[in-house]
């Protein structure tokens, strides 16, 4: 199961990550003005929840931290400070989920709401659960910045699982696809597990025995409400950002009509090839957007109209109601009756 990263410069996140990093740097005597230089974020804005920032702006502050020769444990201390309560609805949805297995699934599904600097994937094996970070070393030309971001990401994962589990729940091991840095002894101190360098890929490994554990704040109704809110926020992000947002809006403006990719590209004054390339750069595809539009419309029709399942299936371009039901099950895990109820 994999997440995708949003466009680098879309301003869609409260500045909580930037604030945490600025705080840690200030404790080392680095002035906020120096930490924030070139980011476009003012020191008076980092605690303003109405200010929206981008992944790119956070990366700029990380780059400044590296250039200012911050303490080697800076990214680890930032990761420890980023508790799930700082993440708004995303954080609360994860804390209220019904098992740690569900936490891992939702962490990927809603990762786009969390100012993501890397793509994350999780895979469950019989004996272990593995987080991997497939693009951790593609997003920056600077080795120091790439290592800074992965160090913060790993510590953040450890902190979040502790928040959900209600106690220490360390990984079995952590693997890094780069040579041991000079401060390698810091890694196990913050991650609470053996750390291995020069590995094939970046991995954070947990014992699969924890997956059925119940989070300390698990609550069925709260989890359902917050996950619904997160679904809506993810949908809003898709409809408002980049080329994918424009495609989404065109498709949503003509419900019941699903033009092909060639027609959409022509409407946007692009070649089909250029549209495909731009969507890939935003971590999505035309088929994925069509699927998401169908999902959004299906939920809207089921909840707000009395149309029959057959009529909704036909309106959304499904060959029959059975295919529509299968798609609903894939999207939501539920059938039409449950969604209407």
Image: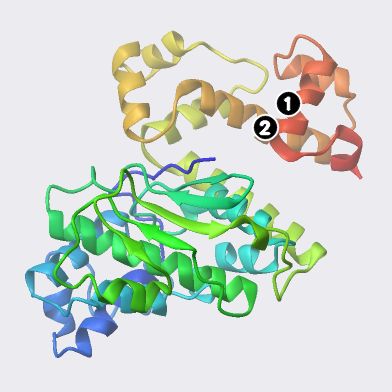
Which residue sits at x=12%, y=53%?
142
Nearer the viewer's eye, disc 2 or disc 1?
A: 1
Q: Determine which residue is flagged by label 2.
A: 295
Tell me if residue 22 comes above or below residue 309 in the rendering. below
- Please tell me which residue is depicted at 24% across the width and 77% down the height of the picture: 74
Q: Is residue 199 visible?
A: yes
Q: Is residue 305 above or below residue 104?
A: above
Whether residue 20 can be seen here: no
Q: Position of residue 86 (x, y in %)?
A: 48, 74
Q: Quadrant of residue 169?
A: bottom right
Q: Position of residue 241 (x, y in %)?
A: 40, 42
Reading the chain from its start, which is encountered first: label 2 or label 1? Answer: 2
Circles 2 and 1 in contact, beta carbons < 8 Å = yes
Looking at the rendered structure, the secondary structure element under dot 1 is helix
Front position in the image: 142 or 44: 142
Of 142 and 206, which appears nearest the observer?
Answer: 206
Query: Left or right: where does residue 181 sit relative to residue 206?
Result: left
Residue at horizontal 30 percent and vertical 54 percent from the top: 176
Q: How would you rate the neighbour count of disc 1 (Cα within 10 Å): few for under 14, some for 14-19, many for 20 or more?
A: some
Nearer to me, 117 or 157: 157
Residue 141 vertical position relative to residue 113 in the rendered view, above or below: above
Of the 4 image quadrants, the one containing the N terminus is: top right
The residue tagged 1 is 327
Residue 308 falls in which quadrant of the image?
top right
Q: Quadrant of the C terminus?
A: top right
Measured as percent of width and height from the top left, residue 111 is found at 49, 52
Q: Is residue 136 left or right of residue 30?
A: right
Q: Is residue 176 left or right of residue 127?
A: left
In the drawing, does residue 241 fall left or right of residue 55? right
Front residue (pair 157, 30): 157
Tell me which residue sits at (46%, 65%) in the image: 157
Q: Position of residue 235 (x, y in %)?
A: 56, 44
């Amino acid at each position: 199961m994999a997440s995708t990263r949003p466009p680098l410069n879309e301003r869609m996140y409260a500045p909580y990550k930037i604030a945490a990093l600025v705080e840690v740097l200030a404790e080392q005597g680095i002035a906020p003005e120096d930490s924030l230089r070139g980011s476009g974020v003012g020191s008076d804005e980092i605690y303003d929840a109405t200010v929206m920032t981008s992944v790119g702006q956070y990366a700029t502050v990380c780059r400044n931290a590296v250039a200012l020769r911050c303490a080697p444990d800076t990214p680890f201390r930032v990761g420890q400070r980023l508790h799930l309560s700082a993440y708004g609805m995303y954080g609360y949805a994860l804390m209220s989920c019904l098992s740690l297995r569900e936490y891992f699934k939702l962490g990927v599904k809603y990762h786009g709401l969390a100012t993501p600097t890397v793509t994350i994937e999780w895979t469950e094996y019989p004996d272990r659960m593995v987080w991997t970070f497939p693009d951790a070393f593609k997003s920056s030309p600077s080795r120091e910045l790439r290592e800074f971001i992965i160090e913060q990401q790993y510590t953040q994962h450890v902190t979040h699982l502790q928040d959900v589990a209600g106690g220490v729940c360390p990984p079995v091991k952590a693997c890094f696809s780069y040579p041991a840095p000079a401060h390698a002894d810091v890694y196990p101190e913050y991650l609470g597990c053996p750390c291995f360098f020069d590995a094939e890929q970046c991995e954070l490994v947990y014992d699969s025995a924890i997956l059925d554990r119940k989070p300390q704040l698990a609550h069925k109704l709260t989890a359902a409400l917050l996950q619904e809110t997160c679904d809506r926020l993810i949908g809003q992000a898709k409809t408002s950002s980049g080329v994918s947002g424009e495609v989404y809006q065109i498709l949503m403006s003509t419900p019941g009509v699903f033009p092909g990719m060639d027609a959409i590209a022509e409407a946007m004054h692009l070649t089909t090839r250029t549209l495909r390339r731009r969507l890939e750069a935003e971590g999505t595809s035309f088929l994925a957007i069509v699927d998401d539009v169908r999902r959004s419309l299906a939920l809207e029709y089921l909840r707000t109209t009395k149309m029959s399942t057959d009529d909704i299936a036909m309106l959304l371009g499904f060959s029959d109601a059975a295919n529509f039901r299968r798609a609903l099950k894939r999207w939501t895990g539920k059938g039409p009756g449950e969604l209407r109820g």
